[in-house]
Amino acid sequence: MKLFKRRAKPNSVPDEVVNPGDDAERRDVTDPVGDDSTAPPAVESPRSPGMLQRLRVGLSRSRHQLSEGLATLVLGKKQLDPALLEALEEQLIMADLGLEATGRVLESLRQRLDRKDLATSETVMSALKATLTALLADREQPLALANHRPFVILVVGVNGAGKTTTIGKLAHRFKAQGHSVMLAAGDTFRAAAVEQLEAWGEANDVPVIAQHTGADSASVLYDALGAAKARGADVLIADTAGRLQNKAHLMDELTKVVRVMRKHDPGVPHETLLVLDAGTGQNAVSQAIEFDQAVGVTGIAVTKLDGTARGGVLFAIANRLTQPIRYVGVGEQPEDLREFSASDFVDALLEE
Ligand SMILES: Nc1nc2c(ncn2[C@@H]2O[C@H](COP(=O)(O)OP(=O)(O)OP(=O)(O)O)[C@@H](O)[C@H]2O)c(=O)[nH]1
Ligand SMILES: [Mg+2]
């Protein structure tokens, strides 16, 4: 076992860094370290103006897509006539809410506004806001690290969804909250994967447990669990290789990873976090269904909301899935991960 140890306390595990360093496989990864890597800023309160502003900026493309179209539609409208409903439906589908969630929104909007004359376009907008918030409200359930030490988070998802970046951001967040964190490089498939995780470990002064590329992912995570227990870490976050949800053998491999980890401790992982790229649109729902069948997803992180106009996919996810949306990613910096809040999300999506 190799331990990538960055400014960590001495321990019994050999700390030499051995990595084949296959540059051919190295992917262009934006430097996650940032300018002020030596002293990570404290995690801001989820409702602080800075965090809300970042969410707002992150969602600007989705907001342009949805909010401005809607505002034009409802402007000066005195009633919720079929033409307006149809136009609303079109806007919501274009924002990637999906047919089902769009249907639910329109139905609930009809009920809210039934038999009421619409005094102003604001009435429609505020009813829409309430409807959208209600659709997301059940999915708001922050991850609590209570009761387990180490609290083990297994991070899964398709290729390039943002797993490793989300792990780096989580390490930053938990560290700033005062937790001791360890990372496990369960993506043994790509040579650059270990280095990428190691860079995040270094930026956050967090040890990374890794083996060579091509090693058995399950055994890396098994060993990492042992190391995290031995060191008394508060949180162990395990990376895994990206895999397409329709490749049965890769999903079986993930099931095996969990099975092997459970030989160490039947209670792990305490959280199986599925990372979904918002830009994948409705496919995110089928990813969630398949990953859930393979390993039992307990929470979702939706990434890259800053790079897409498809932020509406969160409503499709909330409509089809029962798991909480734990986090949303709105950029590549360590601070660009927010705990999910339904009302903040809808506000940021619809505000002028
Ligand atoms: N703009 C933006 N980029 C992101 C976000 N999250 C991740 N990325 C970028 O998306 C790319 C892929 O992210 P990774 O974290 O490597 O994704 P992954 O799921 O680990 O990928 P594999 O390990 O190859 O399956 C990187 O360039 C990240 O910087 C986000 O919230 N916003
Ligand atoms: Mg990765």
Image: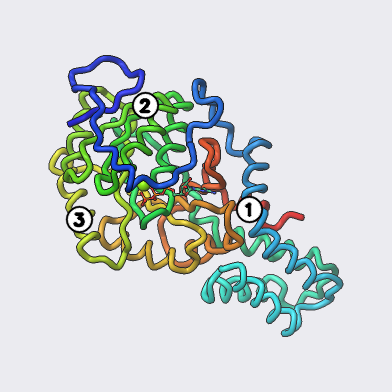
Closer to the camera in the image, 286 or 144: 286
Give the amino acid at mark 3: Glu
The x, y position of residue 331, in whole percent, is 55, 45
Report whether the residue tagged 1 is closer than 8 Å to ligand 1.
Answer: no
Tag 1: Cα neighbours inside 10 Å, few (<14), some, or many (≥20)?
many
The x, y position of residue 184, in whole percent, is 28, 37
Give the side of residue 83 with respect to residue 52, left or right.
Answer: right
Q: Is residue 42 above or below residue 278?
A: above
User: Dot 1 lies on which element?
Assistant: loop
Q: Earlier in the sequence, mark 3 or mark 2?
A: 2
Give the amino acid at mark 2: Val
Picture disc at residue 94: none
| Viewport quadrant of the N terminus | top left
Q: Quadrant of residue 346?
A: bottom right
According to the picture, the residue beneath numbered tag 3 turns out to be: 253
According to the picture, the residue beneath numbered tag 1 turns out to be: 59
Give the amino acid at mark 1: Leu
- What sort of colour scheme is used for the picture? rainbow
According to the picture, the residue beneath numbered tag 2 turns out to be: 206
Residue shown at 44%/28% (left/top)?
203
Quote the CA–CA distance across marks 2 and 1.
30 Å
User: Dot 3 lies on which element?
Assistant: helix
User: Dot 2 lies on which element?
Assistant: loop
Residue shown at 66%/60% (left/top)?
130
